[in-house]
Amino acid sequence: MHASSRTGPPGTYDVLVVGGGVIGLVTAWRAAQRGLRTAVADPAPGGGAALVAAGMLAAVTELHYGEQELLALNLASARRYPAFTAELEEASGQETGYRACGTLAVALDADDRAHLRDLHALQLRCGLDAQWLTGRECRRLEPMLAPCVRGGLRVDGDHQTDPRRLAAALLTACERAGVALHRAAAARILLDGDRAAGAELADGERILAGQTVLAAGSRSGRIAGPPDEVLPPVRPVKGQTLRLRVPEAYRPFLSRTVRAVVRGGHVYLVPRENGELVVGATTEELGWDTTVTAGGVYELLRDAHELVPGLTELPLVETSAGLRPGSPDNAPLLGPTALPGLHLATGHYRNGVLLTPLTGDVMAEVLTTGRLPEEARPFSPRRFTEPAEPAPAPPSSFRSSPHDRQ
Ligand code: GLY
């Protein structure tokens, strides 16, 4: 499909994006830049899970076994961040808080150390840059760390941005690029024969569009209209975060993101240049609940205090909870669905902020050309709806290797 001119009947667009979080906004901004008449439907655009997120760009430190394809996507997006930030800041006239500060992942006891050693081995096998440090070397880098730190991984390529400023800048960039903002929730996807044709909003307005992108985070699977098998299998995964303030006199309190696994839970401290210190995050499978709980706040502060004892002296200025859009394989769903005219940009789970630049590029490409870029093909929504191609049979000499049973 070719980009059309910016004229057309009112309420009719080339592209309607359902959801105005960072993923929906970056999709709309990039689509509008390519000349597509674009609208966003969201009661509060610029909101969503990013308002709670800490903004780590942690492709290397959040690597997991079996997620090498996702790693490639995450790294591709991380590489785009500097140029993306410069372009977005220019387009919006707003700063986004991108900070190339690196990350230090530390171990507090022998179990944590073993876990971190495993992660390091996996990182090296994947060709990633991560350096093992002794506890003393960790404390030399970050003097506020607890004396009991047993070692750590220095990852100079895992940076941060400020998701709240990112969302605000994307909203302004969308407005400046001519994206129409419909400040109401989408109640259902409209169908025209066998095609998606836009959405009806909660206030009754009907927005017609040649292509519709469902980018409503964890709520993307709940919208009426499309057949059930087309809707994304996303679920809400609650995360609670805290915001502390580092007074001028204590700065720099931490110079980079510091993280650890404590009692099996991840805790991370993300220091901003403006003195904000974000502590995250819980991971809770509790449906749609977004209550900030005493237990969540207690556990985050307890674990963060073990890591950096001086942190309890800082003012606690905010507690918040949001919902990550989890998918069955922890990876996003990007591109066309089996319903013509309906695309997905959701399921980013722990990597929504990290994957924002790449998602914008991928979705703009598919919306203008109909083709999903090569790097995004493993993340097509169709991986959950179409049977996988059978794997080729291994050579006979491999069939009964003793390693298969280990
Ligand atoms: N990527 C950090 C989190 O989801 O908590």
Image: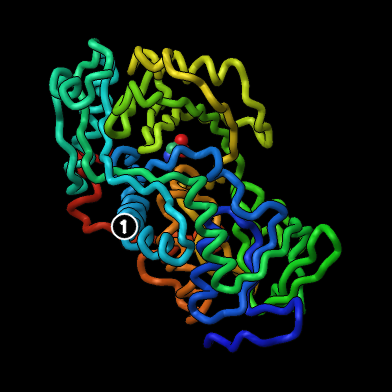
Image side of residue 194 versus residue 375, left or right: right
Residue 232 at x, y percent in the picture: 61, 55
Residue 259 at x, y percent in the picture: 33, 28
Image-quadrant location for residue 307: top left
Image-quadrant location for residue 88: bottom left
Residue sitting nearer the eye, 218 or 158: 158
- Amino acid at pointer 1: Pro
Count of picture labels:
1
Say which element carries label 1: helix
Q: Is residue 95 above or below residue 14?
A: above
| Screen quadrant of the C terminus | top left
Residue sitting nearer the eye, 45 or 15: 45
Asked if disc 1 is less than 8 Å from ligand 1, the answer is no
Residue 22 at x, y percent in the picture: 53, 54
Residue sitting nearer the eye, 76 or 312: 312
| Screen quadrant of the N terminus | bottom right
The way the protein has been coloured in the rendering is: rainbow
Q: Is residue 156 above or below residue 39?
A: above
Image side of residue 385 versus residue 306, left or right: right
Could one spot residue 263 in this view of the protein? no
Q: Is residue 322 above or below residue 348?
A: above
Residue 52 at x, y percent in the picture: 54, 38
Most distant residue in the front direction:
249
Q: Which residue lies under the disc numbered 1?
A: 82
Q: Residue at x 24, y 21 (%)?
A: 113
Q: Residue at x 27, y 41 (%)?
A: 101
Q: Residue at x 40, y 27 (%)?
A: 266
Q: Residue at x 55, y 61 (%)?
A: 172
Q: Quadrant of ligand 1?
A: top left
Image-quadrant location for residue 136: top left
